[in-house]
Image: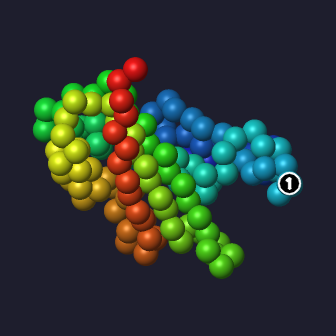
């Protein structure tokens, strides 16, 4: 894997994965950016959320858990003016007929194998999780 970042203007950059995908990184206007994209720290949190969603989906298929909706909210906080995340709270919302026990087991396996989550854990970030089972509309 390789990522390449190219400055575009002000504090904004274009980040590519060298497979044809790109994102714009910038910082908010109140921090002297132009707010043309998510900050690098926001992208990190977005990556964690996306990783949990993707890995849960893969594990759920292996466990034969069918679902009609899956969302992951990831909230990062920085206590005591820390320069990076000290805590992350993840809420997984799923619409499924599967039992809560089966969903919990799926999430446990997801958390053991999510590469981004493993990095957060190794960095000492306190991460908490909760599952909310959605009712079919």
What is the count of numbered marks? 1
**How many residues crowd around disc 1 within 10 Å: few (fewer than 14), some, or many (20 or more)?**
few
Q: Is residue 48 above or below residue 63?
A: below
Q: Position of residue 27 (x, y in %)?
A: 75, 51
What colour scheme has been applied to the protein in the rendered image?
rainbow
Q: Quadrant of the C terminus?
A: top left
Q: Position of residue 22 (x, y in %)?
A: 57, 35
Q: Nearer the viewer, residue 69 or 33?
A: 69
Residue pictured at 83% horizontal, 44% vertical: 34
> Which residue does the image show at 29% across and 42% down from the upper left?
56
Q: In terms of depth relative to the viewer, which is nearer, 48 or 33?
A: 48
Farthest residue, direction bottom: 80
88 or 44: nearer the viewer = 88
Badge 1 marks a residue whose secondary structure is helix
From this viewpoint, which residue is outermost toward the top? 137
Q: Say whether residue 40 is visible.
A: yes
Q: Is residue 116 left or right of residue 85?
A: left
Residue 75 vs residue 40: left or right? Answer: left
Residue of label 1: 30
On screen, 33 above or below 119? Answer: above
Q: Position of residue 8 (x, y in %)?
A: 75, 42
Instruction: Give left or right: position of 56 versus 5.
Output: left
Residue that appears at 47% across and 59% down: 89
Residue at x-position 65% and y-position 79%: 80
In the figure, residue 62 lies in which quadrant?
top left
Query: Percent position (x, y) of residue 42?
Result: 61, 52
Residue 113 visible at all: no
Quadrant of the rendered image containing residue 76:
bottom right
């Amino acid at each position: 894997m390789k990522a390449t970042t190219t400055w575009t203007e002000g504090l904004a950059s274009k980040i590519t994965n060298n497979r044809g995908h790109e994102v714009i990184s910038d910082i908010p206007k109140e921090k002297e950016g132009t707010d043309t994209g998510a900050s690098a720290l926001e992208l990190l949190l977005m990556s964690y959320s996306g990783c949990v969603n993707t890995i849960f989906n893969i594990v759920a298929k292996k466990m034969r858990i069918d679902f009609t909706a899956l969302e992951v909210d990831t909230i990062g906080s920085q206590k005591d003016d820390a320069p990076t995340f000290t805590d992350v709270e993840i809420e997984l919302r799923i619409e499924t007929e599967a039992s809560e026990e089966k969903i919990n087991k799926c999430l446990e396996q997801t958390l053991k194998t999510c590469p981004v989550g493993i990095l957060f854990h190794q960095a000492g970030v306190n991460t908490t999780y909760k599952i909310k089972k959605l009712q079919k509309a």
